[in-house]
Amino acid sequence: MLTNHESRWMFHVKLIAIIFVLFSSIFWSAKPSYALSYGSLSYPQGDVGLLRPDIGVTLELSEGKTPESYHFYLNDKELNVSYDPVSVKFVYRPTADLLPGNYNARLVLSFNGYQPISINWKFTVIKGAVSLTSETSKEQEDGLRAINDYRTKLGLSKVKFSNALNTAAQKHAQYLSSNKIDPIRTSVSLHDEDPALPGYIGKSLRERVQFIGYSRSSSEDVAYNRVSLVEAIDSLFDAPYHRSPFMVPGLVEIGVFRDGDYHVIEFGFSDGIAPELVVSPGNSDVYVPTLFDGHETPDPIRLHAGVEYPVGYPIMASLNGPGVKKVSLDEAELKDESGISVSLLKNEPGKDDHLDTEVIVMPSKPLELDTTYKAKIKLTAIMEDGSTRPYSKEWTFRTEPRVGVGVIKLHKDAVAYSLQMANFGLNRNHLVSFGLNEDKYLLDLIPYPMKQKPYIQDGTSYLYIRDLAAALGATVEWDDNQKAAVYKKRDKTIIFYTNRNAYSLNGVEHMTESAAKLIHETTMIPVRLLAETLGAKVTYEESTRTVNISY
């Protein structure tokens, strides 16, 4: 009986409560609750190869709301999660290794005036999962410094190491090396992995960054070459398709690793703030390479029938930032010091399936050494919302005086390199120094070995003509009929006769008391003849026995 009375009483209470709620909704204005519009990226997903992966959510809130409260659960256990209101990211970093197995993650968010949001996702920590690589070698540090050298001369912010990306780079390089992947004799891509081979962590880059729990946008460069890591980075930057990630303003972190002949760079990007146009070579660069000899897959000149390497150093324009879907090339122009237009090979989205927000413009022939060029690019950006925006840039750069000197100067001191760029136009001279007692000469303070040491005869000092030509950016040929060395640089041709006291400058012969000589079958030029013929300022420092040539 007691039970029946209690049941009846509880029924009346519930009924009264329901009636009260109904009436309250009639007589009082209840605050409405709306559904909040949002987008989210939750991570990690699928199989994860890390024992302590970052677990979190990045939100995109159309109304720009801030949550009143948030709660994170892993396998139904609530854990403390960090919240960054600027990037709208919620991240939980495990303080202990996760056991292999399946995990259910859930983030619950409450907003004033809106229905709560519950974001659910799953991932699996695989057997054999590893810890992130946290230590870096000197070689890796050198690689990071080299990448930042290029960022510095492009006027972009420096990047830092990501333990996750270093781990991904190491795992992929080790996979390529241990399985001896050959991209030259086979069609296998250096960017793919085969699940049937040892060391596999993911077929594509997307799967590999998922494996190490990386949540940012990413891209990858891989080189196969028997060189140092820094030299591989240099070759990747010179290759236009592989140069693209270096040029992204939103590049914030990297991972690098070399195993044998395999060099891997992983790039991690932020979302960026606004679209930004970046060009390479950059404005006022003073040591731009003159040529590109290929060795890139895909081949940039595959779209241009009949063109052969070497071509001129590729010029790139890249537009990166939120909302950019694609670009089209409206105009591209390159002119030399005389105002003459340089013939260009143009690769652009729509014609080149490896380009979206970049264009590649290659001079059809190598550029001239030590020459100033003016470039102009006009683009139209197609935005994700369907709108279009115009972008353009005009700038000037100068080529290096000798092949390869620019990259040496850049890595020797990127800050000094940038200062020289800032002073572009104030001092365009190069300085070459030949020590008569040395076996090296200096070109803009960079040492180069002499092929033939200076020679002194009867108080007259002689320099080897091929060392001079290399230092001054000229070419030399031997004319056996005239017993003369033919020196050429741009519009100047000098014939140094070795069988008589004369030389010819642009077809006009001049007599001289200081003629060139054949010494040990090599053409040697007396120092005093240099000022007469080269049009350069030649000085001699007696105290150091050094010949300085400024040109």
Image: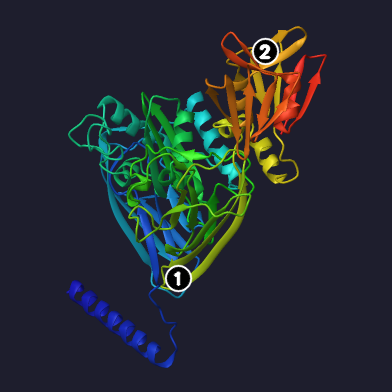
Query: Where is residue 478 shown, x and y percent of the image?
Result: 54, 22
Query: Where is residue 30 shown, x and y percent of the image?
Result: 43, 85
Q: Given the image, on which type of amino acid does mark 1 rest?
A: Ser
Q: Mark 1: which secondary structure? A: loop
Tag 1 residue: 62
The C terminus sits in image quarter: top right
Examine the image and state in which quarter residue 536 appears. Answer: top right
What residue sits 42% from the left and 72% below the top? 385
Q: Residues within 10 Å of mark 2 (few under 14, many from 20)?
A: many
Query: Where is residue 98 shown, x and y percent of the image?
Result: 33, 38
Q: Residues within 10 Å of mark 1 (few under 14, many from 20)?
A: few
Q: Nearer the viewer, residue 320 or 347?
A: 347
Above or below, 413 against 517 in this view is below
Q: Nearer the viewer, residue 293 or 31?
A: 293
| Numbered circle sitting on residue 91 | none
Q: Decide if residue 86 is in sight here.
A: no
Task: Give the side of residue 368 with respect to residue 101, left or right.
Answer: right
The N terminus sits in image quarter: bottom left
Q: Mark 2: which secondary structure? A: loop
Query: Where is residue 134 shown, x and y percent of the image?
Result: 46, 31
Above or below, 494 against 421 in this view is above
Tag 2 residue: 454
Q: Earlier in the sequence, mark 1 or mark 2?
A: 1
Q: Decide if residue 296 is in sight here.
A: yes
**Coloring scheme of the render?**
rainbow
Q: CA distance from mark 1 to mark 2?
A: 73 Å
